[in-house]
Amino acid sequence: MNIIQTHNLSKSYQHKDGVVDALKNVSLSVEKGSFVTITGPSGSGKTTLLLTLAGLIRPTSGSFSILEKNLTHVPDSELAYFRRKNVGFIMQSFALIPYLTCIQNVMMPLSLNKVDKEKQKSMAQEVLANVGLENRMNHLPRELSAGQQQRVAIARALVNNPSVIFADEPTGNLDPSLSLEILDILKEINQQKNITVVMVTHSPVAAEYGDVRIHLEDGQIISIN
């Protein structure tokens, strides 16, 4: 089953110097359970592609679907609801809420989905234990190392049991040993839970974790291996 499909996906931005074509007619299919890495030079359209696939920015033209649902023209409210139910997102900057504890950060998506409070807590505890943070649940982000903060972000992405996790340079702020730790966790999630992972990275080491490796240049797919 193809979990993600795009057809002639394009994204243009209006810049003071003219129109910038960030993506140009990108067509691809991603099978369920794949670990996809997206590489390319700076400005090649990697993050634009990821954000478009995740439904966080709208394409200028073309179409995209997740779980065989065409999301290209659905209303913002419907798109947001679909994301909350089916998609997890991990960013380079961790994006944790600084005044909330680890467990409160992880409970946030469940709260948005109106999950019962006690169930929120037990689900958050479970995913934090999965990423090795059962002893840090009541710590604030500033009390954690960078690697631990990224593990909280992974737990938050995982807590809704998404079909796909999008990761934008998840090891970009980490040293090499911590990077491997985070990549191993993502690979384990991918293999054990059959959750599709789509990851943008500039790291050749991280790119090797992908069983599908997409290389972009100038907004176009140059190769898929």
Image (cartoon, rainbow, N blue to C red):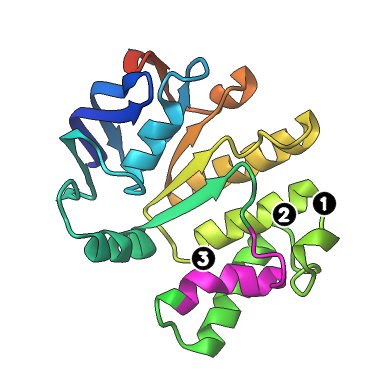
Residue at the disc numbered 2 = 149
Pointer 2 local density, CA inside 10 Å: few below 14, some 14–19, many at least 20: many
**Residue 131 visible here:** yes
User: Which mark, residue 145?
Assistant: 1
Q: Identity of the amino acid at label 3?
A: Val
Instruction: Give the structural element (helix, strand or loop) at label 2.
Output: helix
Q: Is residue 101 magenta?
A: yes
Q: What quarter of the picture does the N terminus occupy?
A: top left
Using the numbered discs, state the Cα–Cα distance from disc 3 to disc 2 in whole angstroms.
15 Å
Main SS, magenta region, reads helix
CB-based contact (under 8 Å), mark 2 and mark 1: yes
The stretch of residues the image draws in magenta is: 96-111
Instruction: Give the structural element (helix, strand or loop) at label 3.
Output: loop
Mark closer to the observer (3, 2): 2
- Residue at position x 62%, y 69% in the image: 105
User: Which mark, residue 167?
Assistant: none
Q: Quadrant of residue 134?
A: bottom right
Q: Is residue 61 magenta?
A: no
**Residue 36 visible here:** no
Camera-side residue: 53 or 33? 53
- Residue at position x 77%, y 29% in the image: 176
